[in-house]
Amino acid sequence: MCGEGSNITSEPTFFIFAFSTSENQRLIILTVFLVIYLIILSGNLLIIALICLEPRLHTPMYFFLCNLSTLDIMYVSTVLPKLIYVCHTGDHVMSYTSCMVQLYFSCASGSIESYLMTSMAIDRYVAVCFPLRYSLIMSKKVCVLLAFPAWFISLVNASILPCFVHNLTYFGLVLLKSFYCELKTLMNASVSDISSLKTIIIISIIYIGFIPSCLILASYIRIINTILKIKSSAGRWKTFSSCSSHLSIVILCYGSAITFYLSQTHEQEIVLSFMFVTLVPMLNPLVFSLRNRDITQAIRRRIDNGVTLFGCPSSSTKERKR
């Protein structure tokens, strides 16, 4: 359980101050954030609906992709609605409880995404290096054993960092120069000694970032080694294309996260924070659908059959029945 902390007299109030704008500029930013949020929701819901409704997509790779889309919706829904509200009302104040909720889901989402990316890398490794035994190795039971601990362990461990942040001391109205209550920003705004928190972060990075990234790297070393042994260039490209979508998202996700925590200026942090929160969840469905023939074919079948993604007959189906 979290300790009471040193600021026991009253909970701090946070002031989200990522940008300073006029009324007209705020309206433009509100529109941009709303459009981005709707794109993320619709894109990831489309992926989830397709995977659930299309029997041909009931494979390990799409099982993990469905988990990833669910995670993206959960993550952005804890950040963007509040940001849209701020732009709409001009009220930048955030309560302590709301801030801790954002921090919790931010920590949990980062951990879950890292483990899911690792599971998808293992899936691609088995598919490329052991194609004849792929169905046997990547069974439904194995997929669940890879995905469920990623969610359960991450959701449980995500409470550790908020507990340490709870013990930090803040004075008055705390100005957070960020889009949301992010760990690095909260640490910089505190007047407490954060050495113990830094130690916990380093340990978390090892388990959440370093070990999964090593597994992903090892998987792709074996994948590339196997691809180079394929004699035909067409065969090499076909095999590599089955991994390119996942590899693109891994580079974008880890690259933006590492760059953010190594950034030095406030302006860099704002831009990279925005990219990490919005760009990755928005690009996930686009990358996996536009560069994936199974997804595009599933969409075409749904359109050609005149059936909506949610199983309800469309107008064209009703007309044919008549």
Image: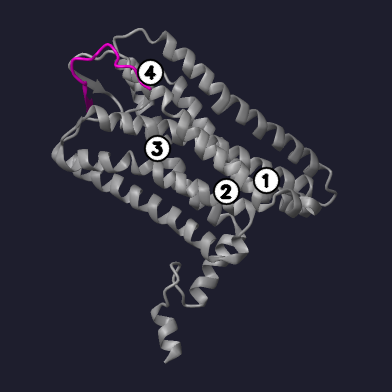
**Prevailing secondary structure class for the magenta stretch in the rendered image:** loop
Relative image position of residue 1 (x, y in whole percent): 38, 22
Residue 133 versus residue 272 in the image, above or below: below
Tell me residue 286's x, y (percent). Answer: 49, 52
Element assignment for label 1: helix
* Residue projecting furthest to the bottom: 322
Q: Residue at x 57, y 25 (%)?
A: 207
First along the sequence among labels 3 and 4: 4
Say which of marks 1 and 4 sits in front. Answer: 4
Tags 2 and 1 in contact by the CB under 8 Å rule? yes
Q: Nearer the viewer, residue 241 or 131?
A: 131
Secondary structure beneath dot 4 equals helix
- Residue designated by label 3: 277
- Type of the residue with mark 1: Asp
Q: Decide: marks 1, 4 in contact (CB < 8 A)?
A: no
**Which residue position is annotated with label 1?**
123
What are the residue bounds of the magenta stretch?
A: 1-16
From this view, report whether residue 140 is shown above or below residue 110. Answer: below
Instruction: Assign a secondary structure to mark 3.
Output: helix
Mark 1 → mark 4, Cα distance in angstroms? 35 Å
Q: CA distance from mark 1 to mark 3?
A: 26 Å
User: Within the image, what quadrant is residue 108 found in?
Assistant: top left
Circle nearer the N terminus (1, 4): 1
Q: Residues within 10 Å of mark 3 (few under 14, many from 20)?
A: many
Residue in the foreground of this view, choosing between 79 and 30:
79
According to the picture, the residue beneath numbered tag 4 turns out to be 164
Please, which colouring scheme is shown?
one colour
Residue 167 lies, in percent from the top left, at 32, 15
Q: How many marks on residues?
A: 4
